[in-house]
Image: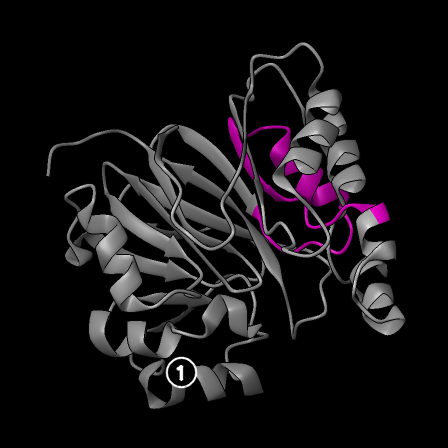
Amino acid sequence: MQDKGVRMLSLSSGSNGNCYYFEGSGGAFLVDAGVSLRALKAALQTYGIPLERIGAVLVTHDHSDHIRNLGSFCKKLRIPVWVHPRIRHSTPMGWMTGQWLDPVARLLPENGAADILPGISARPFDVPHDATHTVGYALEIDDSKIVIMTDVGAMTQEALAYAKEASTVIVEANYDVAMLASGPYPPELQARIRGGHGHLSNNECAAAVKEFAHEGLRNLFLCHLSAHNNTPEKALEAVSEALGESDVRLIALPRTEPSAMFEL
């Protein structure tokens, strides 16, 4: 396949499933496995990309919308799956992967980066979320620095530090405060979402963006928008105000269908 530089494709971004495709000169990899192998194959075929191009999978955490198809990925793709040591043997991982994870599992370092493919490294960093354990990733693909943090109960200084060095950031903007308060969710679920280990609101995302935005930031993707408590328009409005007069490309990723293929 002809080298096309660093590219990204969101396969799905929301509570129905999460999966992101990245590629560089040394190959391609996925972050999370919340879509079916059939859906993944169909989306990649649009761009003439065979499944065999994918050389690794990174896992952010063990909620089902991020790993529900990881077992079939392990079984059929037989490529390295990088997981944090604290979730390697968690109960959800066992349910979702069965016997198929063992032969392909690779442990992420507690500190430092893993070289997952030629010219591609992934450095996990902890983020607060109510899974067994949750990480974001500071990725280096060729000469590009990319940060992805999909489920974030509250922004951390470590996450901000990595985002301040990245040319591309994918960050959660899950809910609008007013929509959540007046929406269909019961009080206990609302409390879980906004309680610091659930999800990031549009306003919290905007505050983080205001803090980490820098001259080298080129792409900002908003992910994991709620179907009931947010709209792309509300998320984009909140974050665009934080960016001000900036030429950063700002996009809200689709919840249940593939995005465009983005050149980063």
Q: For the N terminus, give its image quadrant.
A: top left
Could you tell me which residue is drawn at 29 percent across and 81 percent down?
Answer: 103
Could you tell me which residue is drawn at 73 percent across and 39 percent down?
Answer: 205
Residue 84 shows up from this direction: no
Q: For the C terminus, give its image quadrant.
A: top left
Could you tell me which residue is drawn at 28 percent across and 67 percent down?
Answer: 37
Q: Does 138 appear in magenta?
A: no
Magenta segment range? Answer: 149-178
Residue 51 shows up from this direction: yes
Q: Is residue 110 above or below residue 45?
A: below
Instruction: Locate residue 224, reporting x and y percent.
Output: 59, 52
Q: Quadrant of residue 46?
A: top left
Amino acid, disc 1: Thr
Instruction: Locate residue 209, reporting x and y percent.
Output: 71, 30
Residue corresponding to mark 1: 97
Side (left or right) of 122 relative to 189: left
